[in-house]
Image (tube, rainbow, N blue to C red):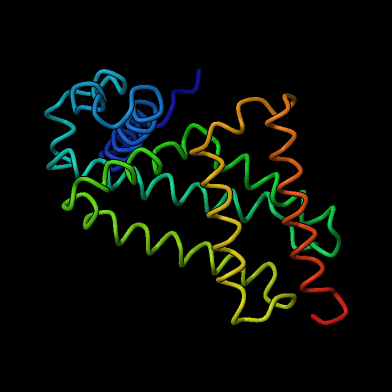
Amino acid sequence: MTSSPRRTQADRRAGTITALLDATVTCLAERGYAATSTAAVCAEAGVSQGALFRHFPTRQALLVATAEHVAARNVEEFRTTVGSDVDTVDDVAAVLAQLRTVVLSPANQTWRELLVAARADAELRTALLPARESLQAQMLAVAADLWGDRLPAGDLAAVLSIVVNMLDGLAFSALDPDPAAAPGRTVERALRLLAEMIVSHYPQEQS
């Protein structure tokens, strides 16, 4: 019988950190910001508070690291699920639908909870700023890789901002409870209109 290779200290450390970050994502999505205490995270992760504070000296440090953790996932999912072929309205509408799934995911609730909390917490707002700027830069870099030959460089950031802000707005609104219900169909139509506007403003022959 072949035994499993022994985990190194670095492996155990990485595993503990990942467990804590994933547990924080779960707590933020299920309990909200105020109820996401270090005790709740440790209970979810099956890790002692002493272990948590060895890796994250404060609750705020844990929350900021979790935001960065989710951002990295979102950027990778954006890159792998969104193709470069965006020639038609159907193509763009499909991209928007995929991005909508990412934005509405339970993991992305992390960002919504933290950004709302940061409105009344100047320290959290300042601590989150580097993570927010990094996420924006990474998303823009991916968009440039995928569609830089189709959209003018000066417009790329603006178009991405319109798309992301619209999808974030949907996530905060009550208009998207069920895609099969009337409000859901309204959202689908809104995404389709946005796709039509993007394609008509940047036709392929002018790219």
> Measuring 58% from the left and 51% from the top, which residue is drawn there?
166
In-image side of 143 versus 179 (left or right): left
> Measuring 58% from the left and 42% from the top, which residue is drawn there?
102
Which picture quadrant has residue 133?
A: bottom left
Residue 200 in the image: above or below residue 207: above
Of residues 19 and 176, the one drawn nearer to the viewer in this rendering: 176
Residue 178 in the image: above or below residue 71: above
> Measuring 24% from the left and 21% from the top, which residue is drawn there?
40
In-image side of 135 versus 180 (left or right): left
Percent x, y of residue 103: 55, 43
Percent x, y of residue 192: 77, 50
Of residues 102 and 58, the one drawn nearer to the viewer in this rendering: 102
Quarter of the picture containing the C terminus is: bottom right
Residue 182 in the image: above or below residue 162: above
Which picture quadrant has residue 85?
A: bottom right
In-image side of 141 versus 10 (left or right): right
Which picture quadrant has residue 57?
A: top left
> Measuring 54% from the left and 69% from the top, which residue is drawn there?
141
